[in-house]
Each structure stands twice: as C-alpha cells, then as structure tokens.
Amino acid sequence: MHDFYYGFWNEKKFPGFRRALLELEKRSVIKFNSSSHTALEKRQYKKMLNQSLDNIEKYFCTLVRMKYIKNSNYYDCLEQIKTINCIDFMSNKDRKVYDAYTLGKDIYLNPDYNDMTDLNHDDTFLRITCHEFTHHMNSFWKEDRNAFCVRMEGKYKKILQKYGLGDVESLRMGIELLGEVIAEDISEEISYGFAKKRRPDFRLMKNEKMYGKTQTFLSNFYVYQELQEVANKFTCCLDFIKDSGDISTNLRKLSEKALFKNFISKIEEVENEDLIIMLACMGKIKEASYTASGLTDLKDCDVRRYLNTFNYLARINHKYSDGVKVKRYS
C-alpha cells in the first residue's frame, strides 16, 4: 500500500482523496502485472509508481493550497483524479519521443526522461507528471470543446474559409493550445515551488521553423515556449479574465478558470468573429509547434501568416483589467 506523502487520511480536509489514490494504485499494479516483465522492470515500475502517486499528492495538495481548486470545484477535480484508469510505462519506441502521454484514461510515463537544466531528477519528474495530470484534469471539458468547435465552425464558416481556416480541427487545436500552456504553466509552478527555486525570467526567443528569422516572442517555459505568448494574448481578449499587466498573472487566472467544468461555456459567452478567427489561427500554430518539435510530420510548419492575423486581431481586441493603463508587451 502507498505510503502517503501528506496527511490525506484527514477526510475532513481532503474528502475522498485517499481512497481515490489507493484505488488508482491497485488498478495500476493489476495492469502492470497482466503482462510479463523482468525483475529490473518490476523494480523500476514500483519506484516510478510510488513516485507518481507522491506527485499526484503534491499536485492536488498544491492546487488546493494555492486556491486553483476551491470548494466550488473540489469534487469535480477529485472526480477527474478518480477517472485515471492506471499509470504505466510507455513502450521503448515511444520513450525516444515522449516524456509522458495519455491514451484514453491511461497515463503512460517515460522512466528514461532527461533532466531539466535547473531542476534535479525528481523535480523534473514532478514537472512531467504534473503536466500530464493537468491534461487529464482538463479533459472534463473535452465534450464541451468538441461541441463548441462544431457550432463555431458552422456559425463562422465563410469568414474562416476566407482566412484558410475552414475546418473544425483548427478550432479544436486552438483550444488544445490553451490546454498545453495551462498544463506547462501549472507543472512548472509546482515543480519549481517544491525545488524552492524561482521560475526563470521571461526572455526573448525565436523559432525559425515556425516564425522565420526575425520574429521573437517572450517565454519562461521549458517546453512549448512558442505557445506561451500566444495563449497570453488570447487570454487578454477574454472579458472574464482581461490583461492584468503581467503574463504570469494572466496565465494563473486562465489556469484557474480552466479547472472549472464551465470553461468552454465561459469562452462561448464572449465569442465573436475575431475571437473565433484567433482560435483557429492558434490551432494552426499548435499543429506547427508539434511539427517543429518532431512530434508530427506535416510538410510545412511556417505559420507566419496565421501569426500575423492572430497578432493583429489580438491588438484590436485587447482588454485591460481595472487600473491597468500601461501595456507592457506587444
């Protein structure tokens, strides 16, 4: 039985969490033992599973402590933890490409992951697992996302086709761009916190495959740097968030909203033609990001025309929070 990292035996403070974690451990061990493994693989898996369960504790407790998870969404988030079917090793072939991925409701992890430059082995694994847990957590608005994209594609079909964006997949991938940035932002917030280190400063970066030689963007991410500023600019166009004047604060607000089931409906409440075009452009940028990283094999990942359209619409739809008068980034 898993030796709990925190006092999750306290049902009053964390109702239902201890049982959810123990049941996940049981399902994971049954799945692993259903196929043959060497003695070394069994030792590796036991260590990885225990560490993964520790990381779920750290993840959930931190989200509660930092008020990402509140009384109003606690049980919805707990249900998402309960829906993880198992945690398992990925295949040797996949280990060359991925650190982690989710297939259905199974989370697959790479025991041979590379350490980050400024985080040790365990804290790097914490970032990897928290990133994947967040993807799973946010899957509770997957059905809403799909229905929303179908509605928006039908409603704005002509204008989307005008920009070369006339398909549901671009809109769906645009929402996934937000999910990728949310997952990375939360995972780095938690992993650097446990490492007792300050997160890296924002700096100007380039991705020549996607944006050419001259285009720069701001990021402090370890991965998906080219998506962070795009997500921030979209966030600043949402009436229910707006621009606080600080990228980290904006993404924190976005991440908090995304841990509620009504996240997609909140976007639909403020949708307009420009936001939907921006979202479809984000989908093209997300696809290109995967290609530039070697995760997909599209022939062309140059998305400058989509980025230019996105940036133009982001500028004219930018909204500031009360008291914010100076624009600190373009």
Image (tube, rainbow, N blue to C red):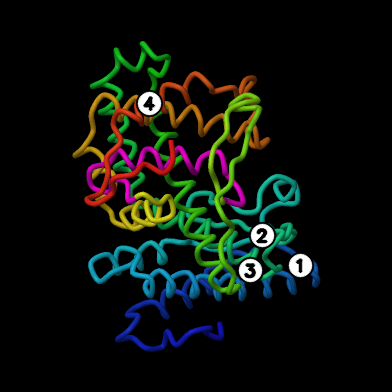
Measure the C-alpha gap from mark 2 to mark 3: 19 Å
Marked residue nearer the N-terminal end (2 or 3): 2
Q: Residues within 10 Å of mark 2 (few under 14, many from 20)?
A: some
Measure the C-alpha gap from mark 1 to mark 2: 9 Å
Label 3 amino acid? Asp
Disc ID at residue 168: 4
Measure the C-alpha gap from mark 1 to mark 4: 42 Å
Measure the C-alpha gap from mark 3 to mark 1: 22 Å
Find the residue positioned furthest to the left.
269
Would residue 83 appear left or right of 158 to someone viewing this image?
right
**Mark 2 in CB contact with mark 4 (< 8 angstroms):** no
Q: Residue at horizontal 45%, vertical 30%? A: 283
Measure the C-alpha gap from mark 3 to mark 4: 37 Å
Would residue 86 appear left or right of 144 to someone viewing this image?
right
Label 2 secondary element: strand
Disc ID at residue 41: 1
Marked residue nearer the N-terminal end (2 or 4): 2
**Is 196 drawn above or below residue 290 in the view shown?**
below
Reply yes or no: does residue 223 show up in magenta: yes
Label 1 amino acid? Glu
**Mark 3 in CB contact with mark 4 (< 8 angstroms):** no
Q: Which residues are magenta?
A: 221-244
Disc ID at residue 89: 2
The picture quadrant where one finds residue 195 is bottom right
